[in-house]
Image: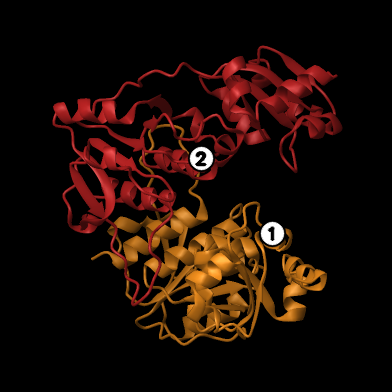
Chain colours: A red, B orange
Amino acid sequence: MLSKNKIKLIQSLNRKKNRDETGLFLVEGNKMVEEALRSEYQVELLVCNSTFLDQNSALSGLANELIETDSESLHKASLMQNPQDALALIRQPLNSRPEFNLNHDLVLALDFIQDPGNLGTIFRIADWFGISSIICSENTVDSFNPKVVQASMGAIFRIKTWYTNLENFLMKSADNQIPVYGTFLEGDNIYNEQLTNGGILVLGNEGNGISKSVEKLVTQKLFIPTFSSGKGSESLNVAIAAAICCSEFRRR
Amino acid sequence: MLSKNKIKLIQSLNRKKNRDETGLFLVEGNKMVEEALRSEYQVELLVCNSTFLDQNSALSGLANELIETDSESLHKASLMQNPQDALALIRQPLNSRPEFNLNHDLVLALDFIQDPGNLGTIFRIADWFGISSIICSENTVDSFNPKVVQASMGAIFRIKTWYTNLENFLMKSADNQIPVYGTFLEGDNIYNEQLTNGGILVLGNEGNGISKSVEKLVTQKLFIPTFSSGKGSESLNVAIAAAICCSEFRRR
């Protein structure tokens, strides 16, 4: 049985304050929970029905605590409109600098990304393009927000994230002659530029783009050309721009 | 004053049935309403406060009917959580075949795109990359869904959309030797392919990809390579894939 207190705990994780206090975050859906159990992350609590248990008997044993319940209770606990057969509470990893070498690793630096769906999608893009570390400004939306986790489609378990002062991080990189890329309307056509294997690609806020203080630290301004004739869109969504940039960095 | 009946009409346009019956759709937000007024679309009703009117006095005159009201009434009528200074009811254009020549125009063909956010984002991408026509399968989400309209950021007013039987449309194109592209896991590396200026790019359903009946009509299967080492994401979001494909078609 799923107690009222457990339901309360699960739902409380919709708020950052409660995630910070408990050190936990919520994952929902069969595929996502399976990925969590297979990942390096510690699954503190698995709540599932018999369907999930039958299909994942060995995997389910990896959770610290397992509560088998019925679909009705799952529905009560879930933050989703159409919950599946499982949800899990996961221990947040420490917020520490991931290992990378900017001379040959490309990392993404997020400057105040606000929308959880965008951040989750950026995780998925990074995962596809073999980018294993993302640096987030301290005002970027929390990567353990349930909407970020769901939109990442499991990529959250494979990408290392670090929330830090972005200006400081970029300043140190500048000292080491690491290229810092960012997209700007006045940037150089990305299709014509020689892009390095390693370095930092900065992605800016949905409404305002890259902030002034971060812009100063960008060493190479890029632009994704528009092919619209006349009055076209003024900008691309940040996740769309991220995808096109990552594709350009990886293609040869 | 905004009557109860008008508020009821505005809110009823959240449902496709009511949009079909009235032939109208809803646009919200200052920038979107301004774009609607500047576009070829007929604005049947403009509802706005004095702030919007002061900033757009000439433009507002283009609406067939204008109701000035206060922010409270706007809030009551709006489908958004944080409505701005204006909303408008727009006449839907006829669902007819747009003009294009597939020998030199690239068009997108959407095979059962379900998510309104994805469709709106695809509009925005098409607009950026100078693609002026989108063909939608009859089961693709309605392009006049308010969430599609908002996510398009105004691109809805610049792109011609046609809902039709996709198989029939593609069969006719095949008869004319028009290339039909689509992305598949077993496709050819898109970075190495010679892509034509004109033709059709098919984008498939979020969960299931391109349907079997449409797959048969694809003449060139493409694949966006993954650079993930080991167990990475299994797929890209359809709008992300669309962006990368469009970028590849346009870059030279």
Where B134 sits versus B29, above or below? below
Residue B156 appears in view: no
- Image quadrant where one finds the C terminus of chain B: bottom left
Q: Provide residue B155's location: percent of width, then percent of height.
A: 48, 69
Q: Provide residue A24's location: percent of width, then percent of height.
A: 60, 19
> Label 2 amino acid?
Gly
Q: Which residue is mark 1?
A: B79
Where B127 sits versus A99, above or below? below
Marks 2 and 1, how far apart in space?
A: 25 Å
Q: Residue at x 45, y 38 (%)?
A: A123
Which picture quadrant has residue A199? top left
| Discs 2 and 1 share one subunit | no
Element marked by disc 1: loop
Judged left or right of residue A221, residue A209 is right
Q: Provide residue A76's location: percent of width, then percent of height.
A: 81, 32
Q: Residue at x 75, y 43 (%)?
A: A82
* Dot 1: chain letter: B
> Label 1 amino acid?
Leu
Q: Which residue is mark 2?
A: A120
In the image, farthest residue toward the top: A64
Element marked by disc 2: helix
Q: Nearer the viewer, mark 2 or mark 1?
A: 1
